[in-house]
Structures are given as structure tokens and as C-alpha cells.
Image (cartoon, grey):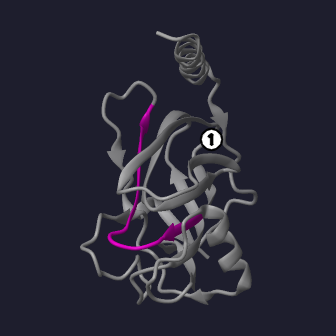
Amino acid sequence: MTFLTRASAALACVLVASAAGAAPKKLQPANPQPSGLKSGLTVAYAWAGDLPAKIDFLAQAKDLLKEGTKSGKPLRGLDYRDTDEGDPVLTFDQTYNVAAAIRGYIRFDEPGTYEVETWSNDGLEAFVGGQKVGIVTGRQTCSPNQRTTVEVPQAGWYDLNMVYFQKWATSCLMMKWGKEGDEDLKWVPNDVFGYK
């Protein structure tokens, strides 16, 4: 084993240990707490045109969204399983080169320490209660992103903001959660998402 290989392995162990021992990210409840929410999440789309594929990175998706968006049919939640190639992305009418800005609220019914895990195909930046809970800056197949431990100080609604992009082929956008220590995280049900 070379010095560089040993150093890389040691650094990886330190990073894993640091992440495992990190304090939970404390979420901030929405203030004021919203009332009369509709079920689901709002979404605004930007489209970079048909093939060839054009969006490779999250930064490109953000730039595209800054140029202008089109409101889409609200999402039912974060329950968009991996599609077949050629299917539309989320509630948009296009298949490729789609960027989406997703907004709304997520409800936690009990305070405590939770684990949250986003899934995406392709890229995603996700915030809940002011804390980043998911990030994929490039492309990937439908896969889990990092698992994030969060502290929920009180039951209620928390802001949810995401930027998502789909380049080509299949797409997905999902989320799992569970109390800290739960062996298996569960898919987040659609009825805990709301928007004004």
C-alpha cells in the first residue's frame, strides 16, 4: 500500500467518524405556523429544450431557474418513483433537461431526533427547516443520497425548499424518514406535505 493510498484511507475513516459523531442539525419551525394548507408541494419548472442532454450539474439547473420558470401542477408529495425512459418528469410535460424549484412545508407530528434521506435521479439540493438535508450536485441513477440526522424541537410545520434537475433517461424524487435508531426508514407519506 502506497503512502498516498494509506493517507486517503485514513482521511476517509476520519471523515466517516466525524459524520457519525456530528450533532443533529436543529430544524427551525415555520414562524408563524401556517394554517389552511393545501395538500402537496408547489413546483415551478424551467426547461432547457429537448435532446441533446444539457443539464449536467446543479449549478446549471439553478441558473436555468433564474432565467424564468413556468408553474406546474402541484406535486402530491415526494413520492415519484423511478420512471420508464421517456416518461414526463414529475408533473411537467417534458422528459429531458428539466429543472424544478419545489416549495412548501413538511409536518412532523412529534418532536425528537429523526433521520431524513432524499432519493433522486438526477441532482438535488434539499432544505428542511433551514437545514440542508440532501445534496447531489451531478447526475446519478435513482439512488439514496446521504442520510441526515435532524433535531425537531416541536411538532408542527417546517419549511421545505428544493432544487431538482433531470437530464435524460429515467427520473425519480423521493424521501424517507424515521426516528433516530429506527432500523428501517419509511417512505414519507404524502399527507404530511402542504403548501399555501
- Image quarter of residue 162: bottom right
Q: Report the span colored magenta.
A: 162-179
The image shows residue 183, relative to residue 31, as above or below, that is above
- Residue under the image location 65 percent in, 24 percent down: 23
- Residue under the image location 71 percent in, 50 percent down: 130
Give x and y (percent) for residue 70. Answer: 60, 90
Q: Main secondary structure of the magenta part?
A: strand
Front-most of residues 181 and 124: 124
**Dot 1 surroundings within 10 Å: few (below 14), some, or many (20 or more)?**
some
Name the element at disc 1. Answer: loop
Magenta span contains residue 27: no
Front-most of residues 114 and 55: 55
Give x and y (percent) for residue 140. Answer: 42, 56
- Residue under the image location 73 percent in, 79 percent down: 66
Front-most of residues 143 and 181: 143
Give x and y (percent) for residue 158. Answer: 62, 54
Point out the image quarter for the C terminus: bottom right
Give x and y (percent) for residue 89. Answer: 40, 78
Q: Amino acid at mark 1?
A: Gln
Q: Which residue is mark 1?
A: 154
